[in-house]
Structure formats: C-alpha cells, structure tokens
Image: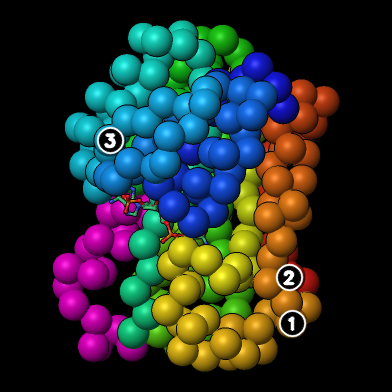
Amino acid sequence: MNNSVIVVTGASRGLGLELASHYALENQVITLSRSKPPELKNAWHIECDLTDPNLISAAFDQIIEKYKRIDVLINNGAVLKTSPLVLMSDDDITNMVETNLLGTIFASKHAFRQMVKVRHGRIINILSMSHKMLVIGDSVYAATKSAIEVFSKILNKEGHRFNITVNNIGLSAMPSGMLDQIVADHPEKIKQIIPHGEYASLKSILNAIDYFCDDENRDIGGQTIYLGGV
Ligand SMILES: NC(=O)c1ccc[n+]([C@@H]2O[C@H](COP(=O)([O-])OP(=O)(O)OC[C@H]3O[C@@H](n4cnc5c(N)ncnc54)[C@H](OP(=O)(O)O)[C@@H]3O)[C@@H](O)[C@H]2O)c1
C-alpha cells in the first residue's frame, strides 16, 4: 500500500504500533488509543478511548475533516483478561466487551459511512485463535472475537456494492503486548496451543493485510486468515 489513509486502533504499543510504524513509511496513518505512541513521521495520533462511542465518533469526525477519506481501518485495539468466568470481575467483562467488540463496531460504522461516499474501503479486524482453540479462561475474550467474525461477514455483504471489503486476521500469538505476562510466566505453554508450534511473524500479518487491501481483491471479503495453522 502507498498513499493511503490508514486508521489503526490500539496503536500505542504492541502489534498496533508495529503496523502503524510500517504503514507510516508510505502512507498517512492515524493512530487511536488512550496513550500516545512514540512520534512517527506521517502519523497523527488522536487520543481515543474505544469504550466511549462519543469519543470514537469525534475522532472519526476529525479524521474525515482533515483527509476526506479513509482507505483502510485496522481494528486492532483490544484488551485481554484471562480467568475462569466465575472469578472474573464484572468490570473486566464489561471492559473486554466494550473495547474489543463495541469499539470495533463503532469504529467500523464511522469508517464505513465515509467509505460508502467514495465507493472504496477496506476494513481489517485483528482476531485471535481464542474462539478456535477454546482455551479455558478465554471465554469472554473469545466471545468478543468470534462476534466480530460474524459481524464482519454481514458488514462485508453490506459493503460489496460500494467496493468495501471486511476481512479478519486470526492471530495465533506473538510475544509482545497483551501476551507478555503469560508468555513470561509460561514460555512454552502458548506455543503448545498453536498447531504450528511457533509465534506469528509480523511479516505474515503484514502480507495478509496487504492481500486483503489489494484493489484487485474486492471479491475477497468476509474471510479470516488464521495464522499458526489454526
Ligand atoms: N499478542 C498476541 O499474542 C495476540 C494474540 C492473538 C490476538 N491478538 C490481538 O492482536 C491485537 C493486538 O494485540 P497486542 O498484543 O499488540 O496488544 P497490546 O500490546 O496489549 O496493545 C493493545 C492496544 O490496544 C489499545 N487499547 C486497549 N484498550 C483500549 C481502549 N479502551 N481504548 C483505546 N485503545 C485501547 C492499547 O492502547 P492504550 O492502552 O494506550 O489505550 C494498545 O495500544 C489485539 O486485537 C489482540 O486481541 C494478540
């Protein structure tokens, strides 16, 4: 991709920051998160809490006012709390649903509306292997990610006549961000869950995003590429 306007949610650290850093080399990137990422050339940060629909709406108003278009939205921002449901606090449950699921839905709504106007757009959601591998402790997190997968298939159908596609990347695991603590405590445990037995590479994730964003691939929508042999 080059010369595109790309919005990345949850880009203050981890995978989102890697994606923003990469795409900012040849595109205009807008990052949305509560804390500020490091300064990047060609990137504009808007402080935004994905649990607040009004802040999401205001952020997209600013983006559209400035750029008039959004070529790509990468819904990456998310939180993970791992715990058997009965031990999980109500706040953690609410936060996961609001951040992961509702944050993705509201961001997609605002981006989609603008994409319709210019008859072009690509929405990519970063999912996980959680709802495929059914790991104990991941019930709420997995529910948010699997709900996004269904959401994406219908939104993709709504978008087809406007040359908008919605696709997903089912990330296995990478030793950064939200898995840091789990990886640090049980370095081999996560790899044992991944069929390929190794962490996802950033290059594979970038390749999958580029594939979905290719202008020629408007017929590839509502799909999920799972990494790690999931
Ligand atoms: N790491 C893995 O192994 C793994 C595996 C499978 C799937 N994934 C998925 O990959 C994506 C990135 O994961 P990661 O490991 O890079 O996570 P991370 O390092 O924990 O980063 C999460 C990002 O989401 C943002 N975020 C969290 N709550 C937010 C809120 N309320 N409002 C706005 N932004 C919020 C954080 O920014 P602020 O805190 O500054 O707001 C941060 O930039 C997620 O969708 C995750 O589910 C990761």
Secondary structure beneath label 1: loop
Q: Position of residue 107 (x, y in %)?
A: 39, 35
In this view of the protein, which residue sits in the foreground, 226 or 7? Answer: 7
Q: Which amino acid does label 2 sit on?
A: Gly
Q: Mark 2 points at which residue?
A: 228
In the picture, the quarter occupied by the N terminus is: top right
Q: Name the residue rendered at 76%, 46% in the picture.
A: 207
Along the horizontal axis of the image, is 136 left or right of 224?
A: left
Along the horizontal axis of the image, is 137 left or right of 157?
A: left
The residue positioned farthest toward the right in the image shown:
216
Q: Which quarter of the figure has residue 53?
A: top left
Secondary structure beneath label 3: strand
Q: On screen, 143 above or below 26?
A: below
Quarter of the displayed picture in which ligand 1 can be seen: bottom left
Q: Mark 1 points at which residue?
A: 197
Q: Name the residue rendered at 44%, 52% in the picture.
A: 13
Q: Name the residue rendered at 50%, 14% in the picture.
A: 69
| N-terminal-most mark, 3 or 2 | 3
Q: Where is residue 213 in the image (x, y as percent from the top left)?
A: 70, 32
- Front: mark 3 or 2: 3
Q: What stretch is highlighted in magenta?
A: 84-102
| N-terminal-most mark, 1 or 3 | 3
Q: Mark 3 points at which residue?
A: 47
Crowding at dot 2, Cα within 10 Å, few <14 / some 14-19 / many 20+, comes out as many
Q: Which quarter of the figure has residue 109?
A: top left
Q: Where is residue 66 in the image (x, y as percent from the top left)?
A: 40, 10
Determine the CA span between mark 3 and mark 2.
33 Å
